[in-house]
Structure formats: structure tokens, C-alpha cells
Amino acid sequence: MLTIHKAHRLEGRITVPGDKSISHRAVMLSSISKGTSSIKGFLRGEDCLSTIACFRGLGISIEDKGDEIIVHGKGLYGLKEPEDVLDAGNSGTTIRLLSGILAGQEFITIVTGDKSLRSRPMARIAVPLRQMGASIEGRDYGNLAPIVIRGGNLKAIDYDSPVSSAQVKSAILLAGLYSEGSTIVREEITSRDHTEKMLKALGADINTEDGVVSIKKSELVAQDIEVPGDISSAAFFMAAAAAMPGSHLVLEKVGLNPTRTGIIDVLKEMGAEITIDNLFISGGEEIGDIIVKGTKLRGINITRDIIPRLIDEIPVIAVIAAVAEGKTIITGAEELKVKESNRITTMVTEMKKLGIQVKELPDGMEIEGLNQITGGTTESYGDHRIAMAMAICGLFANGPVKINNSDCIAVSFPDFQEKLKAVIK
């Protein structure tokens, strides 16, 4: 159990763990590249360690040297049939992206996960991968893990994705590496593009234009990869500091990919003082220092268009909306219902426990501003982002806020508590 007390301001310089999305992709793409890769800044959270375990199960040698991860890639066709079931743990990214790679392998693989992952939708990747020629079976007609994948002999497809999901897009693009012809994915609202950037850096024949991505069969060549700080982890600190007058916080070397910076845009619209310094590019990804000065924020409307750029940040946005001036309305966020928990229902339930006036909507929530947040005991639902959002709530509460089952924070931010303590004044 984690207990958080009221803070007066946040001050200091911190680094946040390596980007979760990029860490996953670095291991996966290095494994199917030709040659040896060094990955620096890798996030040693439970989800990314699940990805390493799965690729070791597929015969890839991966060494953890402390300051770097060494992956001995075997090319597109170097994976071997696993002797046992692969376990993706709690990681939707692992099971969905891995499925795209396995769709290209001429052997059978069974992939499962923990209780939460086994309840998350897989049809969104099974449908397009079947269209490409892979055999995918599982519970509920292949919609629920464990799933059984038998791949090989894929053909390219032109796919209109019904959801703006980087996981769906990535699964299809990875299968496209193994497909005859040009595989095309179209999205109404562009989702995060880390897969495309990394594939291009590793030599894939890939093009992006106006929300349409196309890829052709291509070999990947190993490269050393530096993983930037995760903006989704930084968001908890950014939001808290932005809403707390007198705060001055610097978050160093954070990934600033434009498909992920919705949180910065939203905070600025709420009146936050945020600047970027020391900007540079590594592996196609923008990286820089985020400087936040605390001030009084105001409520805003957050709508569907920006949601894919801040889907993981909505829990913490909801928290600071509760102390901003005026009402905040979040809509178009149905995707929150199929995360590690139903993040709409769980956030509304837990915020109400702390005296916050909030109403659940079918696709989001409505939060009244200027709440007097009370202390209390909250639940994490085994969801790392809910646990951290409740911790941020504690910084603004009049009494201590306790979070049950807070161990789940280790999924993405193992030293969250220590980093938070270091900047609380």
C-alpha cells in the first residue's frame, strides 16, 4: 500500500523511466533484425520484461548488461518454434505486436497473459491477420487469449482500421514485413507512430502519408537504439507540477514524438506554463527537457480528435481537472474501457471516494473544478496508471490518500515513489 500526503509544491530535476512503447519495439525489432543491437535506456518494467521473455522463448539470445540490453538478432526468419506457451503477462503491446510477427512464422505458437490481459479484445488484430493468411484461434472465436497462431505465406492487405490503435496498426505492419505485395493501413485519426519510425531507422521499405502507412517485404538491419524517457510516465509529474502554484520542475530527456504530446497541448490549453529545452533527435524520435512552472489551471473540453495522442494520460488529466477552475469534459475516449481496467469507471469510482464531483459518461467523464479533495483509501484495480493517478490526487488532498495494491506501478515506473518523494516540498 502506498500513502501520499499533501504537497505545497514540486521542485527539482528528474529523469523518468525509458519509454515503454519504444522499449517493447526495440526488443521486438532487434530480435528480427540481422546482427547485434545495443539498447540503452530500456524500461525494466514488468511489461517490457514480458517481451524479453517471449523472444527468449522464440530462441533469441538477449543479455541484460545493466546499462544496456544486448539483442542478438536472427533476421525475419530466425525465430524458432517455442517449446512452451509464451506468457505476455499484463502487456497488451506484447501480445498484439508479437502476433503480427508470429503471423509471418511457419510454426505454431500459443500466447497467453494474466487475468486482465485474457479479458482484453484480440479480434482487432485477429481479423486483419487472418485476412493476410494467418491462422489465429482463441477463446470467443479468437477474441480472447490464450490465442494460437500458425503463420506463413502471407499476402498484403489494404486495411481500414476501425480503431485508432497503434497496437493494431503495428501488428499489421509487422506482418507486412513477411507479406507479398504492399501492405497498407489507414486510420481516421493517426495513432502513435513509434513502430513506423523504428522500422524506417532499421531499413524497412515503409512510407507514411496523411494517416496512410504502407510497407513492403523487407529485411531489417540491427542498429543501436537509445530509448528516451517515457512521456506517459512524465505526465504524472508534469500535470501535478503544472496545477500546483510555486512548482518548478524539469523532466530531462523525455520523448517528444508529436503523436504522444497531447498531454502538453492539453495542459497548455488549461493555462499551464510549459517550455521545451535541449531538443535533439535520436532514431527518428524527438527528445528534450520539459520545464514546468506551477500555476492555477482552468477546465476545458477534451474531444475525440486529440484522444489517441493522450489516451494513457487521461487518468492524471482527470485528477488535475478536479482542482482546476471550471468544468472539464472528456469525450471520445471509449478506448479507455479496454485498458488494464475500464479506466473511465475506475477513475470515476475512486475520485468520488475522495469527495470529487465527477460524472461518468459513455465515452468519458465530466469533472467539476475546485474540489476540496479529502483523504481516503483507494483501489488500483491492478492498473498502474490508476494507482499513479490516485497518488497524484494525494498531493492535493486535505488528508492522506492510501492506494491499495500499488505494486502494479512497477509495470511502467518501478521507482515512482522515490522520484515523487525527491521533488515534494
Image (tube, rainbow, N blue to C red):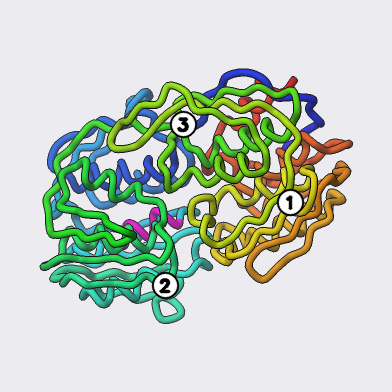
Q: Is residue 97 left or right of residue 180?
A: right
Q: Is residue 1 visible?
A: no
Disc 2: which residue: 162
Give the prevailing secondary structure in the magenta stretch.
helix
The outermost residue toward the bottom is: 141
Image point (40%, 32%), residue name:
228
Q: Is residue 88 visible?
A: yes
Q: Nearer the viewer, residue 156 or 125?
A: 156
Rendered view: 240 above or below 137: above
| Image coords of residue 182 (percent x, y) | 15, 65
3 or 1: mark nearer the eye: 3
The alpha-carbon separation of the residues under discs 3 and 1 comes to 29 Å
**Magenta-span inclusion, residue 99:** yes
User: Are there few (<14), some (14-19), or many (20+) residues within 10 Å of tag 2?
Assistant: few
Q: Is residue 39 left or right of residue 386?
A: left
The alpha-carbon separation of the residues under discs 2 and 1 comes to 32 Å
Rendered view: 207 above or below 424: below
Rendered view: 105 above or below 197: below
Determine whether the residue tagged by mark 2 lies in a helix, strand or loop: loop
Image point (14%, 59%), residue name:
216
Three-letter code, disc 3: Val
| Image coords of residue 341 (percent x, y) | 61, 59
Disc 1: which residue: 379
User: Are there few (<14), some (14-19), or many (20+) residues within 10 Å of tag 1?
Assistant: many
Q: Name the N-terminal-most of marks 3 and 2.
A: 2
Disc 3: which residue: 254
